[in-house]
Amino acid sequence: MGGCAWSSLPGSTSDGGAGGDARIGLAGDVMLGRGVDERHADRRPESVWGTLLPDLRRLDGTLANLECCISERGTRWPGKGYYFRTGGWALPALDVAGIGAVSLANNHTLDFGPSALRDTLAGLERTGIGSSGAGTDRRAALEPAIIDVGEVSVAILALTDRMPAFAAGPRRPGTARMGLGERSWRARRLVRDVLRRPAVDRADLVVASLHWGPNWTLVKHPARRAFGRWLVDAGVDVVHGHSAHVPHGIEVYEGAPILYDCGDLVDDYLVKEGLHNDRSFLFELVVEAGSVVAVRLHPVEIRRSTAHRATGDVARWLFERMRTLSSRFDTAVRVESGTGALRVSVTEG
């Protein structure tokens, strides 16, 4: 698996709670369809990661939002403006970068219907990549992924408030779709239920991966921010947000990092003037003795549908943008000596 130590644990064999060390990557949208597919389908799997590949491979594993289906079957969902799917090359591409788990709770997983979703699920399972947030029925869609990364066991619950028509039903394939706001009582009941499950309770870290809110914004709605804080109060250790296509500021709330939006790691989108949606970060959770002590931010630039490590003026622009956005939450962001990455301290020491 690209040299990274991820493994799916359907029944959770981890003892949990013992703690351990790990470097866990969090990425926003990974969209491998359309122009990305055209550029990289006939190349080596690692080509899509460009100069970012060494940063990805230094991690013990990465969790990302897979913003497309992986299938050559199916028909377009009626009435959508954009359709994203990619071919089988995407599976070794994810694997070689150490992307060991993906969220499927988003507004493109069913772009080509249930058969393409089934192909995506089967391909990920075959490759050994965990997933959460979509399934063959509602129960499967809401099932958390329980995985090991490095010395740390991680439970991942993926949810979305996008695309109501994609919501899974009792006998219908789809996504774990529901409201994700301050008054979202259904989501709160679900999260409480998931956190009580023995396999989740035994995990060292619980990550809530949320595809929430509209595109092209720099701040989440206050109701969504309230839900993010409630998740921490309920027992979630890390909030991993995505959807806006641009990174948002980081809040450290009650000792837990809330990444309201991680932007995009790779795509083929037009660049919006002023937003620079071609610039983002690969976020790294620094885990020591089973707890997140810091978040490192490695600057990323998308060029010609390929992810690259950002340098020079682009990296400086990203650093200043994140400092500004995180200052809304009184979060201190500094440049880490030795690595050149940004660092947000979560706990003392």
Image: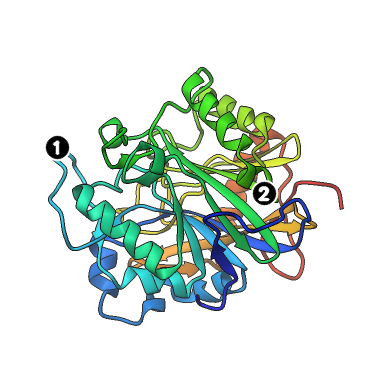
Q: Nearer the viewer, mark 1 or mark 2?
A: 2
- The amino acid type of the residue labelled 1 equals Gly
Percent x, y for residue 274? Answer: 42, 45
Q: Which residue is mark 1?
A: 79
Q: Which residue is mark 2?
A: 205
Percent x, y for residue 204? Answer: 70, 51
Q: Is residue 144 above or below residue 7?
A: above
Percent x, y for residue 172? Answer: 26, 38
Foreground residue among 73 and 280 = 73
Give left or right: position of 112 versus 237: left
- The amino acid type of the residue labelled 2 equals Leu
The image quadrant that residue 216 belongs to is top left
Report the residue at 26% width, 46% height from top: 110
Give left or right: position of 282 versus 143: right
Give left or right: position of 325 versus 139: right
**Residue 184 visible in the displayed image:** no
Report the residue at 22% width, 70% height from top: 38
